[in-house]
Image: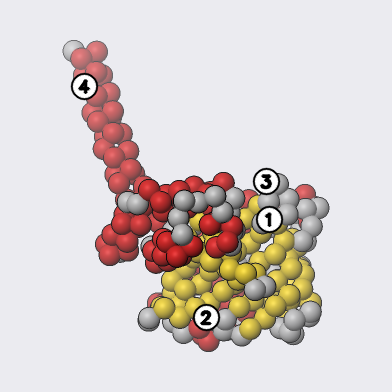
């Protein structure tokens, strides 16, 4: 097991296909994920990054495993704050599963660094991003403030 | 959400299931085999308890290669705390505010 972990489970009233699209398609992510876009060819081994609206790369890495609408594993390193970059690569897993009328989204973000500052940082970010994503898919509107670039980054 | 919290309370009511949660808290991300080690329960019993914990959303699983790893999900317990403790805290703060107002009244008089 990894030294530091963040786990989050969200139940979203949608389909696995729509949720999958919302997780990776820039048209969606810009609206709830602080105006960021992800870039990748979405194949195992392809490069991956998250880009802010101003063009800076926030995080980068590689697609490790991909099963559309079911599972995504990314190798993920933060690229802006040096002390977080210094911790190296984390591993992020999305698992999607239909449960009745809901889709269960499990997010596990882990890093082999004890008391990882990076995992501490994403532990604050994920609940906001995923709550906004849930709101967007269920009501058509993201949470206030999540459609703009974060201040001070 | 009432039904969901019923599931959480039922899941927490069995000491065996609390032991499993404690073991995940100590070492998160374990396989069924690891969770069965040194337990005075059959593998079937552990499987059944884990299923109830997962239905209550107290345990989440993530696949890693051929293995299924079990993780403690603290969110349902946090939601229970939010539901009752925050209300209690608000009440306590109101009592303190009233006490302060009364004491200040006396000083003025």
Which residue matches tag 2?
Answer: A19
Q: Where is residue A52 in the image (x, y as percent from the top left)?
A: 70, 69
Q: Where is residue B19 in the image (x, y as percent from the top left)?
A: 45, 48
Going from N to C along the chain, the mark reached first, 3 or 1, is 1
Which residue matches tag 4?
Answer: B102
- Closest to the camera, between mark 3 and mark 1, is 1
Secondary structure, mark 3, is loop
Same chain assignment for discs 2 and 3: yes
Cβ–Cβ below 8 Å for labels 3 and 4?
A: no
Which quadrant of the structure image shows residue B52? Answer: bottom left
Same chain assignment for discs 3 and 1: yes
**In the rendered structure, the residue with mark 4 lies on which chain?**
B
Left or right, residue A97 beside residue A48 = left
Cβ–Cβ below 8 Å for labels 1 and 4?
A: no
**In the rendered structure, the residue with mark 1 lies on which chain?**
A
Marks 4/2: CA–CA distance? 56 Å
Secondary structure, mark 2, is helix
């Amino acid at each position: 097991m990894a030294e530091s972990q963040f786990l989050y489970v969200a139940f979203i009233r949608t389909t696995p296909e729509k949720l999958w699209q919302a997780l990776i398609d820039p048209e969606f992510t810009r609206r709830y994920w602080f105006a960021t876009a992800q870039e990748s060819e979405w194949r195992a081994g392809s490069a991956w990054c998250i880009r802010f609206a101003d063009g800076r790369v926030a995080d980068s890495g590689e697609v490790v495993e991909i099963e559309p609408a079911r599972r995504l594993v990314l190798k993920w390193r933060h690229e802006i704050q040096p002390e977080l970059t210094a911790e190296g690569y984390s591993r992020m897993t999305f698992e999607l599963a239909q449960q009745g009328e809901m889709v269960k989204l499990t997010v596990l973000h882990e890093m082999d660094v004890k008391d990882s500052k990076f995992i501490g940082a994403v532990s604050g970010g994920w609940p906001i991003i995923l709550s906004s994503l849930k709101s967007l898919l269920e009501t058509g509107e993201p949470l206030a403030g999540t459609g703009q670039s974060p201040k001070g980054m | 959400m009432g039904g969901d919290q019923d599931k959480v309370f039922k899941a927490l009511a069995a000491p065996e299931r609390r032991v499993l949660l404690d073991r995940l808290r100590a070492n998160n991300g374990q396989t069924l085999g690891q969770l069965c080690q040194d337990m005075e329960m059959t593998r079937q019993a552990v499987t059944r308890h884990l299923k109830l914990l997962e239905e209550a959303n107290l345990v989440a699983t993530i696949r890693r290669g051929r293995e299924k790893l079990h993780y403690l999900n603290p969110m349902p317990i946090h939601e229970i705390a939010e539901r009752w403790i925050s209300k209690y805290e608000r009440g306590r703060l109101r009592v303190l505010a009233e006490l302060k107002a009364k004491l200040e009244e006396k000083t003025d008089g």
